[in-house]
Amino acid sequence: EGYGVAVELGNRDEQATFKLDESFIHEMKGDLDAAIAAAAKAVELSRINHNNLSELTAVGRLGACYREKGDFETALRVAMQGLAQAERLAISKEIGSFHLDIASVLTQKDLSAEAMPHYREAVMILGNIGSWELVAGVIPRLATCANQINDAEDLWLVAIWGSQFCKMVEHHQWERLIPVVVAALKRAIEISSPDASHGHIQRLASVAMSEKPQEQPVQMQLLGSIVYLFWIWMEGGDHAKIVDFARHLDNQTGTVLKLEEFVGVPYSEQNR
């Protein structure tokens, strides 16, 4: 009904909006062909009306429908077209979102290595414009890809970026991010050389630790303590004290991070 009124009034922006809504409704009902048709109509109407932002939104919706249908080749093509247009228009949030769309398709095609650069771009772009909620959703996907291809450098990036963004996001988001950060950190240490690990842990310490930890948000106090734990473990400190400290942190976090288990063997013995 609303679409019909918009047609009668010749309001293409409203027509496009109604078609986008229609696309969501069709998808929720499981009719992906109808969802695709409605999204494609929204793209067409936005293009005719020269509404660039509306068109990019509709292109993103169209790609998502093809991805949901399992037509990854078309979804990838649509996302690449959207990225090119967003870059021409220099709309940062859309550029980051289309990088994420491309990474998602490549991941679903089991092309994790090809997806990684797009995940990295999405994190950097969306982080630079303060889209913390979107970034908080990208970090775990970046971690999954890095794990799949055993990419130590990207696992360190997950730990560093994740720590940075933990400071910016709400409690329900950092609570989910911290286990991702710690898992990435542990895996990065396992597959990195001692020299590389020492260099990266220092960089991570500059992000997560503070000279005045009591003035930091609670999540950064926790992350700072965890990074300190790994640092002294790697430096070969008193092992009994390190294990006690790890046990204390595990008790604080419900043992989900399994820190005591990880540092149970001295670092020098793990890296012979």
Image: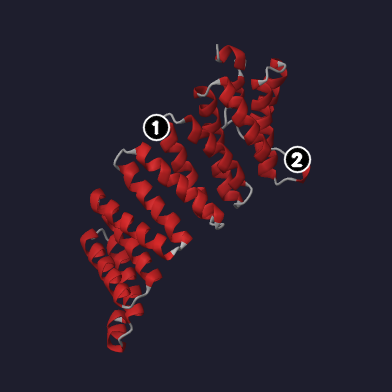
Determine whether the residue tagged by mark 1 lies in a helix, strand or loop: helix
Residue 71 in view in this figure: no
Query: Which residue is at the front of the view, 166 or 118?
Result: 118
Q: Is 197 situated left or right of 44 in this image?
A: right
Give how far across and how far down residue 197 sits, in percent. 58, 26
Amino acid under disc 1: Gln
Q: Is residue 91 above or below residue 223?
A: below
Q: Is residue 227 above or below residue 216?
A: above
Mark linked to residue 213: 2
Quarter of the view holding residue 29: bottom left
Q: Label 1, on which residue? A: 148
Q: Is residue 172 above or below residue 266?
A: below
Quarter of the view holding residue 18: bottom left
Counting residues from the start of the chain, the first of labels 1 and 2 encountered is 1
Give how far across and how far down residue 114 sits, in percent. 35, 40
Q: Determine the residue positioned at 46% across, 45% down.
A: 120
Mark linked to residue 34: none
Quadrant where the C terminus is found in the figure: top right
Q: Determine the residue positioned at 66% across, 43% down.
A: 219
Q: Determine the residue positioned at 36% across, 62% down.
A: 85
